[in-house]
Image (cartoon, helix red, strand yellow):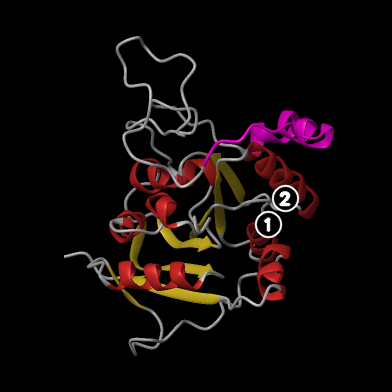
Amino acid sequence: MPDEPSDAAPDAPRFRDKPVSFVRRSGRMSEAQERAWAELAPFYALDVPRDVASTSVHPDARLVPAETYGRTAPLIVEIGSGQGHAIVSAASSRPDDDFLAVEVFRAGLARTMLDADRAGARNLRLVEANAPEVLETLLPEGSADEVWVFFPDPWHKSRHNKRRLVKDGFGAVAGRALRDGGVLRLATDWEDYALQMRDVLDAASELERAFDADGDAWAPRFDGRVMTAFERKGLNKGRDIRDLAYRRVARG
């Protein structure tokens, strides 16, 4: 169920009016993760004004990338960064680009900060927030060069499909955040979700395929995505990994 604020005004809405693509599960962080949060969050984690829920983004909240990173550089945003393996690898190997990890699970963010600090990735920031609200509100329009959605929760039971991140309307949400010519990259090991992603994004007027335009084609594996244990697990279970890539069309 959606998460609930602890300090909402009595007459304020207490829940989101749309399903989210995650469920907040309680879980204790390890001692190392607690220490990482205390020591590293002041640098890596963005302090985001909240709306009605603990992972929400206030409608007036805005990220100014040049102020956050102290420079003007291409910005890559990963949605659902998990433990941070993909984005830390990318950030540490691409020092001329800036990276933003979006995740709702604090233990994963703490692990990401630990690994980023060890790798010396100072071009990475993290935000603990619901991804659509980051794309719709926090990021300035046209500020992202790329948006990555790698292995989002498939919510494979049909009654839970409404919780999927990539569904009708997501093309407009991602397209708002992307600059003209920017790229949305996706990957999943669930065939039916891959088909849904392709149908949804093919229908989005803001986007066009950045791969073979034939109807049943898939994009080649993105070589900027490090092989993670999560992806390897899907392969070991015999599931095919399907990639997609879409380019933001020029605004009128």
Circles 2, 1 touching at the beta carbon (< 8 Å): yes
Residue 176 image-quadrant placement:
bottom left
Position of 92 with respect to 118 (left or right) is left
Q: Nearer the viewer, residue 241 or 221?
A: 241
Is residue 37 part of the magenta span, yes or no?
yes
Residue 241 in the image: state x and y as whole percent.
Answer: 57, 76
> Residue at left 39%, top 59%?
166
Magenta-drawn stretch contains 72: no
Range drawn in magenta: 23-43
Task: Note whether residue 27 is visible.
Answer: yes
Residue shown at the point (41%, 34%) measured from the top left: 57
Gap between marks 2 and 1, in whole Å? 6 Å
Name the residue tied to disc 1. Answer: 88
Residue type of the residue flagged with mark 1: Val
Q: What residue type is labelled 2?
A: Ala
Identify the residue position indicated by label 2 in the image: 116
Of helix, strand and loop, which one carries label 2? helix
Residue at image point 48% right, 54% down: 72
Which of the marked residues, 2 or 1, is nearer the chain's N terminus? 1
Q: In which quarter of the image is residue 178?
A: bottom left
Can you name the residue that lies furthest to the top here? Answer: 10
For image coordinates 31% across by 17% down, the residue present is 12
Q: Where is residue 239 in the image (x, y as percent from the top left)?
A: 61, 75
Mark 1 nearby-residue class (10 Å; few <14, some 14–19, many ≥20): many
Instruction: Pick the residue in front: 134 or 3.
Output: 3
